[in-house]
Image: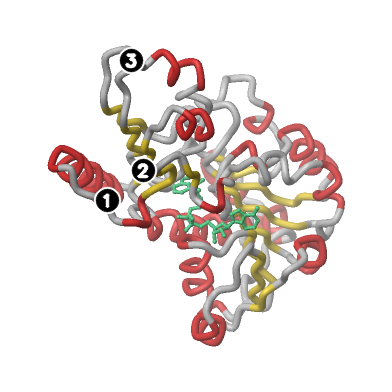
Amino acid sequence: MEDLHVLITTPFHPAYVTAERINRAKNLKLLLTAGIGSDHIDLKAAAAAGLTVAEVTGSNTVSVAEDELMRILILVRNFLPGYHQVTQGEWNVAGVAYRAYDLEGKTVGTVGAGRIGRLLLQRLKPFNCNLLYHDRLKITPELEKETGATFEEDLDAMLPKCDIIVINTPLTEKTIGMFNKEKISKLKKGVLIVNNARGAIMDTQAVVDACSSGHIAGYSGDVWYPQPAPKDHPWRYMPNHAMTPHFSGTTIDAQLRYAAGVKDMLQRYFKGEEFPVENYIVKDGELASQYR
Ligand SMILES: NC(=O)C1=CN([C@@H]2O[C@H](COP(=O)(O)OP(=O)(O)OC[C@H]3O[C@@H](n4cnc5c(N)ncnc54)[C@H](O)[C@@H]3O)[C@@H](O)[C@H]2O)C=CC1
């Protein structure tokens, strides 16, 4: 790392580019994230060291939003227990149907309505749900009209209304551990949660406890803390989960997009050109606004 000028990383290993590593890498100028979400980099240390941090913004928006829609349906329809019956040689309709619902008519709230959250709202529109969103910023009136989604400025007021919560914020100082015991206690009993954003937005044990008590009736996502999830990570063993390894944003289509995006930024860097403005996470010592 000491001799590197440019370091390209993926978002799969939390706390990978630490302040210590940054400070040892005296020649480092540029950190590129092949994907979205640069919380694996100590962004304050990168800014203090005068580094540029950039990611391939938008490269896996479709991939993650589609995956979230799939996870919502898997949880609402109680799909996995039905599948497990089949693989285990069983046949018990009542044993699975008592927890299977339609998505239609349910209230779905996204915490974060950026690129992924907004596309999810658009994808959910034909399912005739009641759509809510919480964000630092409102979406455009046009998109509010198109999706029928209602802005909820106060997160605590939105949480008890939702049958399904989807997390779509980055991991920042404001969102780390956001869903602790107290926040979870505000959720509707029997809520379903989808989190493809970052595992550390949740308090790991609070999620386990709420899944065990039934307060959370289903939890699905592909992000964990730490990653790779150790064999004894409690989310592997909690009831009513539908967890996978971190791959919602890594479809073949997404890989092609973020590889092309990294190549484009490398070419621009070596020609002394600017990157697309939305790609910058740290530039000239400043963090992008949502990371401040
Ligand atoms: N599992 C996976 O494979 C992937 C996960 N992700 C995760 O999803 C996150 C979101 O991605 P995008 O939608 O592309 O990012 P984005 O930057 O377009 O949207 C993030 C949204 O979160 C909002 N936000 C930030 N902090 C907030 C706070 N404290 N309270 C309320 N809202 C807040 C922002 O205003 C913004 O609208 C990424 O940061 C990353 O952590 C992204 C891609 C792949």
Mark 2: C-beta under 8 Å from nearest atom of ligand 1: no
Figure coloring: secondary structure
* Rendered residue at 48%/35% (across/down): 245
Position in image of residue 93 (x %, y %): 66, 58
The residue that mark 2 highlights is: 54
The residue that mark 3 highlights is: 1
SS for dot 1: loop
- Pick whichever of labels 2 and 1 is earlier in the sequence: 2
Circles 3 and 1: CB atoms closer than 8 Å: no
SS for dot 2: strand
Residue 72 is left or right of residue 275, and the answer is right
Q: CA distance from mark 2 to mark 1?
A: 8 Å
- Pick whichever of labels 3 and 1 is earlier in the sequence: 3
Q: CA distance from mark 3 to mark 1?
A: 24 Å
Mark 1: C-beta under 8 Å from nearest atom of ligand 1: no
Q: State which quadrant residue 84 falls in.
A: top right
Circles 2 and 1: CB atoms closer than 8 Å: yes
